[in-house]
Image: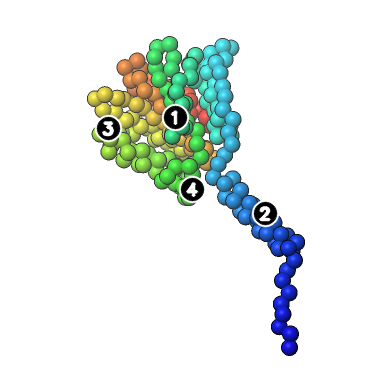
Amino acid sequence: MNHIKTLPSKRGILEVFKGFLVLLAIVFLTGCASQKISTLVGGEYDAAKDATEYFVFPLGKTELPGKWEKGRYSQVSGQQFFHNQDSIVVAVAFNRFDSYEFNQRGSLKGFDFIQGFYEWESKYFENQGFTVQIIESDREKNYIIYQVYSKKADVCFLIAEKNGNVGSFSTCSAEKWTENERVAFLKTLFQEFTK
């Protein structure tokens, strides 16, 4: 009996190897694609509207009433800071609801996500020595407005969700505006986000 096995040709091995590499590349690229979203960021002051537009396409857009200048940008939170001639500071961020560590599986949506975000943020701020309180919440419109403060800082936030996109808006200069003015301003940003 002849027990000699024939080995595949070099050409056959190369074809199998190429197929394996293509399959590996597809699996790798598919995994990466689900983790990142390409965005287009822009906006500017529109004198005709007397508003400063800001957008992060496809995640969200808003208009800040009046003329605002861009300040620093936080890579960690995605917040774009703006300031006006009165030195009032506003921050705007747009993200996906499943981009936050407490909701990476995307199990919380709508107002459940908003409540989860508030609980997550308030624990963080309380651990840093701040007091956190809800000013207003609206289950139907998917937003919560809350205040984070201490002797040294006072920030008012509005967090909202629309179709899986999250808008985070905040004002940082409490001494220039009353609480009602701050809330009204944040609601204006929210209304532009949900159009």
- Quadrant of residue 21 in the image? bottom right
Q: Does any portion of residue 144 appear in the rendered image?
A: yes
| Nearer to the camera, 139 or 175 | 175
Precedes in sequence: disc 1 or disc 3: 1
Looking at the image, is 33 positioned above or below residue 24? above
- How far apart marks 2 and 3 lie (CA) works out to 52 Å
Q: Measuring 31% from the left and 17% from the top, which residue is drawn there?
A: 175
Q: Secondary structure at mark 4?
A: loop
Q: Secondary structure at mark 2?
A: helix
Q: Secondary structure at mark 1?
A: loop
Q: Circle 1 sits on which residue? A: 74
Amino acid beneath label 2: Val
- Please state if 102 lies on the left or on the right of 5 as rendered: left
Q: Are marks 1 and 3 in contact (CB under 8 Å)?
A: no
Q: Circle 4 sits on which residue? A: 106
**Crowdedness near tag 2: few (<14), some (14–19) or many (≥20) residues, C-alpha within 10 Å:** few
Amino acid beneath label 1: Ser
- How far apart marks 4 and 2 lie (CA) works out to 30 Å
Precedes in sequence: disc 4 or disc 3: 4
Precedes in sequence: disc 2 or disc 1: 2
Q: Circle 2 sits on which residue? A: 22
For the C terminus, the quadrant is top right
Q: Does any portion of residue 112 appear in the rendered image?
A: no
Q: Are marks 4 and 1 in contact (CB under 8 Å)?
A: no
Please name which of the two marks, 2 or 1, marks the residue nearer to the observer.
2
- Please state if 16 lies on the left or on the right of 171 as rendered: right
Please name which of the two marks, 4 or 1, marks the residue nearer to the observer.
1
Q: Are marks 2 and 1 in contact (CB under 8 Å)?
A: no
Q: Position of residue 55 (x, y in %)?
A: 55, 27
Q: Circle 3 sits on which residue? A: 130
